[in-house]
Image (cartoon, rainbow, N blue to C red):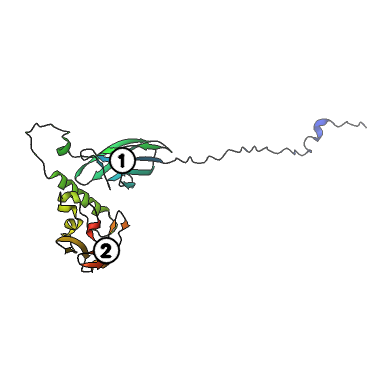
Amino acid sequence: MGVRTPKKNDFAMNVPNFRRPAFITRLLPLSMPKVHAAGVVEGRVLDPIAGSYLLNARVSAKRTDLVALTGSTGGYRLGKLPAGRVTLRVIHPALEEAERVVQVVEGGAVRQDFELTTRSRSGSVETVQLTAFTVAANREMDAAAVAVNERRHTGNVRDVIAAAAFGDVSEGNVGEFIKLMPGVAILYAAGEASQISLRGFAETQTPITVEGNALPRASSSAVGASRGILLGQISM
């Protein structure tokens, strides 16, 4: 009886295959969205004819809700502007609006100044040679525009007049400027405007401030001692 020696292939079907499919995991870095820093545009608004900077001129960026008003020095600042080309628009009463295209730099500041005037005053469109004449209404018209613009942007109910609208007043008494305003009564002493009464209140209950500073409320005049403010203390 012969014995057969087992061969290698005889056990091939009985040996389990322990190999498993290999999975390769590739870790990709998380891509964070790029944050764009906002740009800033700043500058000043000038009236070249009057030679003065404009207060409360409205500066806005078109196609956005960003608006700024110029301060007493004519300066403005617009922030949070997207980088790229932005159109700025400036508006002021009695003057023609202006537009400028500004290249806003990401995370930086760009300066853009404006000059506002009117064609009738600057003669930028056509030049017509006229004989010499005197214009007397220009100062009054500019003063009225200043007063209207101040009332428009004030935060409360306010009456505003510009002293330039009245020209030269004898002795420069402030009472002569405001005596025609609604609710104002002027008290005279020795023929001069002495004190102010508002809305029927006594002159001692009418405070006056100059550039935000309260004036002292103790005085003596031709009518005697008073806690009111003498208009002669205010220089024009």
Q: Write down the residue under mark 2.
A: 219
Secondary structure found at label 1: strand
Q: Position of residue 150 (x, y in %)?
A: 25, 52
Q: Is residue 131 left or right of residue 79?
A: left
Name the one closer to the observer, 179 or 10: 179
First along the sequence among labels 2 and 1 = 1
Judge whether 196 appears above or below 134 on screen.
below
Q: Identify the residue at image location x=30%, y=36%.
A: 101
Q: Position of residue 210 (x, y in %)?
A: 28, 55
Q: Identify the residue at image location x=81%, y=33%.
A: 10
* Count of residue discs: 2
Rendered image quadrant of residue 42: top left
- Whether residue 175 appears in this view of the structure is yes
The amino acid type, in three-letter code, at marker 2 is: Ser
The amino acid type, in three-letter code, at marker 1 is: Arg
Neighbour tally class for label 2: few under 14, some 14-19, many 20 plus, Cα within 10 Å: few
Quick one: quadrant of the N terminus?
Answer: top right
Q: Position of residue 174 (x, y in %)?
A: 20, 56
